[in-house]
Amino acid sequence: MAVKHLDKIKKLWHFLTTPEMISYIIFGVLTTAVNVVTFGLLHPVMPWDENLNVLVANAVAWVLSVAFAFITNKLFVFKSKSFAAKLFWRELASFLGARLLSLGVDELGMLLLVSGLAWNDWAAKIAMNVIVIIINYVLSKLFIFKDGSSAN
């Protein structure tokens, strides 16, 4: 039984230490930093009520972090270096669609955690970023950059 668990741990470690996963983690951390810093800078200066401040600051943070993530995911993580119009627009549209889905999850999660469950803004933001990172990786790997198109 212990050997099975050890094998699972080894497989997980191998997966987490692949070059693609390491770069995804690094750029995911940087994307999260863009998102969280933007949210942190905007949220306190928003002129509306607390609930609207959270949602607007979160949406603006999302826009900036998605732009950063598309560029870094395309070029450095999934190594899709082609800028042929058809491929580029397909990747961009798919990426934006997937990110809109994860934005919905993020916004609903923030609303539920902050307004519904009275979580601290930062705890909610960090928890939701973990969930969003997982969703985004799966969608990017399986649907958006699936071709691994690195042709120029």
Image: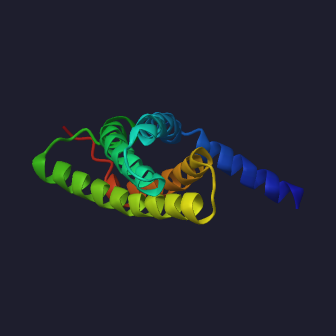
Q: Identify the residue at horizontal 50%, vertical 62% (top origin).
A: 111
Q: Identify the residue at horizontal 63%, vertical 63% (top origin).
A: 117
Horizontal arrangement in the rendering, residue 5 relative to residue 99 (left or right): right
Task: Give the residue furthest to the right.
Answer: 1
**Colour mapping used in the image:** rainbow
Q: Nearer the viewer, residue 29 or 38?
A: 38
For the N terminus, the image quarter is: bottom right
Task: Give the residue furthest to the left.
Answer: 85
How far from the left and from the top, in percent, is residue 106? 47, 58
Q: Nearer the viewer, residue 117 or 48?
A: 48
Horizontal arrangement in the rendering, residue 18 relative to residue 59 (left or right): right
How far from the left and from the top, in percent, is residue 118? 63, 58
115 versus 42 height, above or below: below
Q: Identify the residue at horizontal 28%, vertical 55% (top origin).
A: 96
Q: Nearer the viewer, residue 86 or 58?
A: 58
For the C terminus, the image quarter is: top left
How far from the left and from the top, in percent, is residue 139? 41, 59
72 versus 142 height, above or below: above
How far from the left and from the top, in percent, is residue 123? 62, 47
Q: Identify the residue at horizontal 85%, vertical 55% (top origin).
A: 3
